[in-house]
Image (spheres, rainbow, N blue to C red):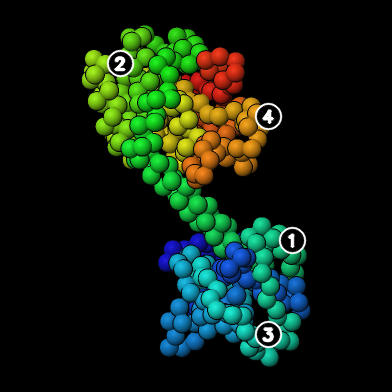
Amino acid sequence: MKLIKTITDKCFIDSEVLSVSKPRLTVRTILINDEDKIALMYMSKHKLYLFPGGGVEEGESLEEALKREVLEETGCSCNIIKELGYIYENRGLQDFTQQSYYYISKKCGEIRNATLTQEEEEEGTSCDWYDSDEIYELLKVSAHETLQQKFLQARDMAVLEEFRNVMKNSDDNMAQDIVNEWYESKTNVDEMIHWQKETLKLWETQVSQKYFPKNAKILDVGCGMGREAFNLTKMGFSVTGIDISNEAIKQVTELSLIKGYNIPFLHFDGYSMPFDDNEFDVVIIWAQTFGLLYGDKYKITFLMECRRVLKRNGILSFSGHDYNYLSKNYLQCLNGRKFFPYADTEIYWEAFTIDELADYAKQVGYAIKLCQTGEIYKPEDGTIIHCVCQK
């Protein structure tokens, strides 16, 4: 199980004292009910909130101890979903150390009466259920006086942050699977060739004419059915296209041969690009591709990979749906920043403001040359946001 955090006296006071005592082992859990609420224990005597759990008794495994403690404190049986990590506490001034192992678990069955110890009853121990934002506020605002209480607060705050990161990454990964499945469907890829235009969009033409070096070597990320690659090749550029969809790569390769182009189209996994460092003069992420990179972490990692394959002073041009335009004209298709263009499907495109799109590039170290709205083909097509930046 991975270490989430080490907490020592120095986190709270000016003390370098460390204990060499044998750690006490405890086990605790993020316990989730059927309404996706999380169990939180409260000790009214100390005004202290904690995740359920307690000490591991002799002869018990961590899992056995967890299920016993959860049943005693909350009255719930639970199924352990996954390991979360452990916290190591070294309370040097108290000559005490502790390792607390945390799991994510799911409530199962009916809630029965808790069987609290006399000490727990005297401390006014009770259990209630909250969402993660409510728990964050409860753990954060509590003002604890004793050093021990400060340890407990810091411990569970670190665990909550780890849990939220794990769940966010899990949600992003599941959403990314939806994208992969959508673009591997032959039916969906077949439709792409019918609704895409033959020419570059107005803003794409302007960017390529003004910012792309003559005879530039261009990487087209999310090449789809080749609209951008075909047109840029006709303009004299040397283009390589990559896409996460095997089906799209198969079809665009066949289409390219029919049209008489000699453009390499390659499949990649969406993370690692199969190219050496400093290989391309220009990288483009056009159409809706950037909005399909769900989650901030994925976008940043992706832009870093683009930066790796760009030559010194190379140009990155990428675009996304215009949130302000969509909120005025397609509000019924928006859920927050998620734009759902197709009815009864789970796939969506993330929408952005100008500042948000530029900020992604800045975080990776690009110099912004241009970030603005762009025209598509005609006024009734609306606008997109696009960014031109330099390595």
Residue 96 visible in the shown view: no
CA–CA distance in space, label 1 to label 2 = 58 Å
Which residue type does callout 3 highlight? Answer: Glu
Earlier sequence position, callout 1 versus callout 2: 1
Instruction: Determine the secondary structure under disc 3.
Output: helix
Figure quadrant of residue 141: bottom right
Q: Which of 56 and 108 is in front in this view?
A: 108
Q: Residue furthest bottom?
A: 118
SS assignment at label 1: helix
Cα separation, mark 3 vs mark 2, equals: 72 Å
> Which type of secondary structure does the marked residue at label 2 adopt?
strand
Q: What residue type is labelled 4?
A: Lys
Judging by the rendered image, the residue that carries numbered circle 4 is 328
| Residue depth check, mark 3 versus mark 2: number of the one nearer the observer | 2
Q: Which of marks 4 and 2 is nearer the N terminus?
A: 2
Picture quadrant where residue 15 is located: bottom right
* Residue 350, image x, y percentages: 54, 37
The residue labelled by disc 2 is 238
Residue 314 x %, y %: 41, 20
Residue position for label 1: 141
Identified at 75% across, 72% down, the residue is 47
User: Residue 318's x, y, as percent?
Assistant: 48, 25
Tag 2 or tag 3, which sits nearer the N-term? Answer: 3
Per the rendering, the mark at residue 120 is 3
Mark 4, mark 1: which one is toward the viewer?
Answer: 4
Q: How far apart are marks 3 and 1 (CA)?
A: 23 Å
- State which tag comes first along the sequence, 4 or 1: 1
Dot 1: within a 10 Å radius of its alpha carbon, few (fewer than 14), some, or many (20 or more) residues?
few
- Upstream in the sequence, badge 3 or badge 1? 3
Q: Is residue 18 left or right of residue 236?
A: right
- Which three-letter amino acid code belongs to the residue tagged 2? Ser
- Left or right: where 165 falls relative to 306: right
